[in-house]
Amino acid sequence: MVVGSGHLAVLSAFALAQPLFDLLSRYAEFFAVRGSTSWDIILFALTLTLAPPAALLAVELVAWLIDARLQRLLHLAFVAGIAGIFFIQLLKNTIGLSSAVALIGGAALLGALLAVGYARARLIRSILTVLVPAPAVFLLLFLFAPQVSKLVLASDPEPRTVALSSSTPVVLTVFDELSTTSLLDERGEIDAIRYPNFAALASDSTWFRNAASVDAWTVYAVPAILTGILPRQRRLPIFSEHPDNLFTLLGGRYRLDVSESLTQLCPRSLCPKAARPAFPSRMESLFSDAGLVYLHLVLPSDLRRRLPSVSDTWGAFLESSHERTHRRLLLHHDFVASLQAGERPMLGFAHLMFPHIPWEFLPSGRRYEGGDLPGFETNHWGSDSFLVEQGYQRYLLQLGFADRLLGDLVRRLRSAGMYDRSLVIVVADHGVSFHPGGRRRAFTRRNLDDVAFVPLLVKRPRQEHGHLVDDPVQTIDILPTIADVLGVRIPWRVDGESLFGLRQRKRFVFVGDRGTFSGDLDSLKRRRAASLERQNSLFGSGLKPPGLYGIGPHPELLGKRVEELTVLPGGDASGRLDQANELRSVDLGAETIPARLTGVVSGGGAGVHNLAFALGGRIVATARSYYFAGVERFSVLVPESALQQGPNRVEVFWVRSGQELVPLLRQ
């Protein structure tokens, strides 16, 4: 049995531990952004290596106490099962099998054959015996991998603070996934109707309209803002990797109120309030998230689509979208509440994870059940243009909510008597893009203007009038600007330059997945103009049509009463609404309202269908159905104003031709 347990350890290491070790050793940010300690990572690795075979051995011991033959049968079953898991990955990665039935069936057959061979052939057992050191080798290779070892072995250096005399409060807010284009109206100015708080801040700030990020990934983009240094790929977003940053520059004199979401750059000696979660909570999160990552590694694509995404954030994958946004809002509210005058000048920094996905907030502050995001998988948009446009719509609606959060921040500064005398900077880490078949945010030729251009507003102390600057500036210029305004000398070399100095930059510098490259301002501005034209054609600006709810295949139907249209007799086609119960008793005062309608279409024949949705007898939205897992579905957002307190009558129609409607659902 001892030898057999070693064999199980070998198979478990190849099937379970090594795939995760290989992935996480290349993406150690998985540990860094959650504040995992050295011992957290070591315990995680030991558990992943030892716990599965130990659990199987315990079961075998119980079986052996009952009957030795039962133990041998269980041992062969365990060999077949673990080998089958290994063969799933082998078949998927080597011959590209994607069908769940073929992949799992083939892997099960190979696992059973290996178990038979294991029982009958000494050679197979001998090979596994020779490989007994493999689990320990995999463990050590993981712990001493270049990225992981930075977390396991490194210790934080003593912060090198700077002596300074400034008493100017500094507030730096970094929004996440916010493209400049999305804030603009048709004139290229901030849309004051949709985003009044951004426009108001711009009216007494310096707006750098052509500001660009330097990286498309938060774990590199935010440290670049805080250090003034261009990102280096594979550098982790932790203090030991960025010992010279805004917090150490001002931390010797300033009181720090810091809210970091995905970085750990403020040393604990300067940010004691930034406590890690309790050990049990950290480990529970670590193992649950790693387990989901493993399922994404192993399962075929048709099963993987049903899993929660692991591409939107670095953790908390099993949280519902509501739990995730609720946690982000708590961080924002806590940060805003902390902004107050004191004996020491204040540095307030917040990385605000809005309007970042998941998109489920309306500009009013109410939310809808966002749940899934049709048309998007991993990092790419699908080919269905309507679903991509609906993703764009949901993002812009949540951007309206982000504008509301900015208003909360400014009002707090005013009420605390700090706004006029503070240096206030608002920026985003990177933008976001919406093109069928394109990436959401990684730098590509197609989306560079969307992802690179970010809003940058700088209000200097006592500044009362807005100023527009169209020079090419970048987010690495923010820290040198803070130092310039405060009269502080930066004791390390920076790549940025003060926004209020003599700027020498002629071209942008970007750090992408495949290395550093440059971009021409005029070329990117032309592309941004084309992107803005597309945005305006889809959504208009301000109060101008078509509006944020005007997308869909038949916008001409919007606002018409059903009784004005031709409604044909219903056929075999029908629809089912997921929100049927919620719509029977809508509470407009609740935090969540049924502003997103989803459901199923059946019996309408092959292909997708154009649909119209009526509330209270008036068409309020149109959409095109789509297929997911072989089922025809629909997803549409309806205006808040279309909902009424209490019961709401919903009608779903199939738009056949012109304005002829076939009823699918009348409730």
Image: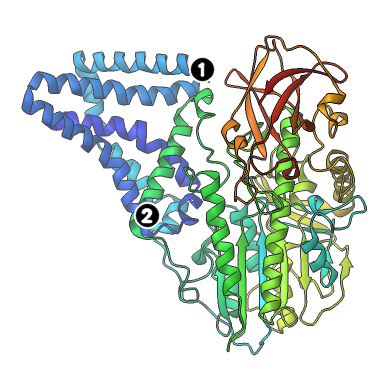
Q: Position of residue 109 (x, y in %)?
A: 35, 13
Q: Position of residue 662 (x, y in %)?
A: 76, 16
Q: Are marks 2 and 1 in contact (CB under 8 Å)?
A: no
Pick the quarter of the image with the C terminus: top right
Q: Residue at x 34, y 58 (%)?
A: 279
Q: Which mark is residue 281?
A: 2
Query: Residue at label 1?
Result: 99
Q: Residue at x 80, y 48 (%)?
A: 449
Quadrant assignment, res 287:
top left
Q: Position of residue 195 (x, y in %)?
A: 79, 57
Frontmost of labels 2 and 1 is: 2
Q: Image check: 145 left or right of 542?
A: left
Element at label 2: helix
Quadrant assignment, res 125:
top left
Q: Residue at x 74, y 67 (%)?
A: 477
Relative height, residue 366 to residue 16 (above, below): below
